[in-house]
Image: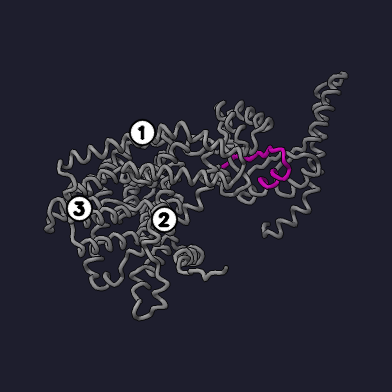
Amino acid sequence: MNETADLSIYKEALLFLATAGVIAPLFFRLRISPVLGFLLAGVALGPYGLGSLDKRAPWLSALAINVESIDRLAAFGVVALLFTMGLELSFERLRRMRRLVFGLGLGQVVVTTLALGVIAWILGLPPASATTIGAALAMSSTAIVIPVLVESKRLGAPVGRASFSVLLFQDLAVAPLLVMAGAFAGGNERGLGWALLSALVPAALALAALIVFGRIALRPFFHFVAETKSPEFFMAACLLVVLGDGLAAAASRLSMALGAFVAGLLLAETEYRREIEVTIEPFKGLLLGLYFVSVGAEINPALILARPTLILGLAVALIAAKALILIGLAAAFRLPARVGAEMAMLLAPGGEFGFVMIGAALAGGLVDRSLATALVSAIAISMLTIPALAKLGQRIGSASRPRAGSAPEEPPPDSDERRVIIVGYGRVGALIGDMLDMHNVPFVAIDADARLVARARAAGKAVYYGDASRPDYMRRSGVETARAVVVTMDSPAANEAVVATTRSLRADVTLVARARDASHARALYQLGVTDAVPETIEASLQLSEAVLVDIGVPMGLVIASVHEKRDEYRKFLVAAGAPERSRSTRKAGRP
């Protein structure tokens, strides 16, 4: 029986997909951060935009997004973002960053909370309310700052590491600050100290349990799933780990994002790291876009127009005060002045956790609704300025960069070397790796066989599980800085796919591929390999060399003749592949 579909349940999804498919790409084409596009779309589609036209234009108000219906799903955008940040790090790198995380990050939260709290107290608020507001305004926006840094390729730069360290500590501070707000609101009769202790001890135990369980279970779990060679099952496993760890952390009164970050840290040390990054990236991008739309929907343009001096003044004062504090802290921790200035531009605006803290303060009676609305609007307005402030910070940083001849800046820890990438780590790939090791040439290997990867990792080799025919995977494997790429798989079609992907990403890299026979070698030359090595021809040359030496022909003459014959074959195969290769490059518009 046919039933009339209720199209209203699809409205939010359709509006968001229209934003992601039309508005965000338009902003990207205009060289404006897509984050700003999502935020402005949220303003337009939110309850204070089209939703406010209910009486004047009901047909337009019907297009407004119901924020409550997308809020919970949108929150997973930040969770997925922190998970991918964990994948980019490791416990060792995090240990090296401890001075910034627990020094600069702690200093930023404490100093900013106290400074802004004192200002609020001077303006007439009670100490408890002032401190809660100071903590809320001290937070910065992980969800906007990290994508902006990634987009400008500065996450691995000093400003990126310093900013991420502060953001990470802010996330660690979520549970204590919420407990503090609850205690101030009278939620715990035994006082703030007992409330913090009773919340932090279980949270610390839960975090330790997550780490222990993750170290024991995650690698075998992904090995089990990877053996199915099913992208769908692998994707499901990735989402299960992200959401499962996030919810487990939330059940322990920790931040969901912190739980996902820990899961990412644990998986960063496994051979599945890069494939997981590639798998989770589209979900992260869409969920973050949905999150930005929900943030934009919190902005009330009518309130800003009604009280522009108050709202805009609060936003400007917040950015100015936090920027000055961050610059001072950066100098105290001996960061270069330009790094401090760039970091201040990124972290001075408010953050998403500020909304949570203001909501807790409102629910506990620490602030009235009028003040809460003004503060939320000021935080949201300040978040809108992050892309523009990031560009300003980048200009300040480039203008004050050391001139040629001055001392070079310290490179980031664990920066990728210019390595050789081996695709396929069977017997051929492993032998190539051994030869590279013999000559002290660093390499990273990729293979789609989970069992082979596990054995190689157990032997201490830098081998990762993944599909090298995917452009995003090869980018994450460092193809843009690789010294060479060697393709050694035994499947001709798979080799050709990897060769085509590699050449499309980088035209100048040395690209050597294993070929089954002369015909396959010609096809590889057409795709743009530097050298193709046909198995049948090489086997024939090796057999010829062995028999000639065994029957008494001088080895020098034999080796010279083998090299000469190999060069003849290579010239013939290159020439055979050249006409087709030339036509294909002309079609592609390359010279």
Residue type of the residue flagged with mark 1: Ala
Q: Secondary structure at mark 1?
A: helix
* Residue farthest along the bottom direction in this orientation: 56
Q: Please tell me which of labels 2 and 1 falls first in the chain.
A: 2
Residue carrying label 3: 116
From which residue to which does the magenta span run?
481-499
Image location (x, y in percent) of residue 481: 55, 43
Q: Circle 1 sits on which residue?
A: 208
User: How many callouts does the rendering have?
Assistant: 3
Amino acid type, mark 3: Leu
* Of 282 and 231, the residue lying toward us: 231
The answer to whether residue 35 is left or right of residue 272 is left
Instruction: Indicate the position of residue 82 as horizontal and vertical percent values.
Output: 41, 46
Residue at 39% over, 47% down: 160
Residue 259 in the image: state x and y as whole percent.
Answer: 38, 42
Q: Is residue 7 magenta?
A: no
* Residue at mark 2: 73
* Dot 2: element: helix
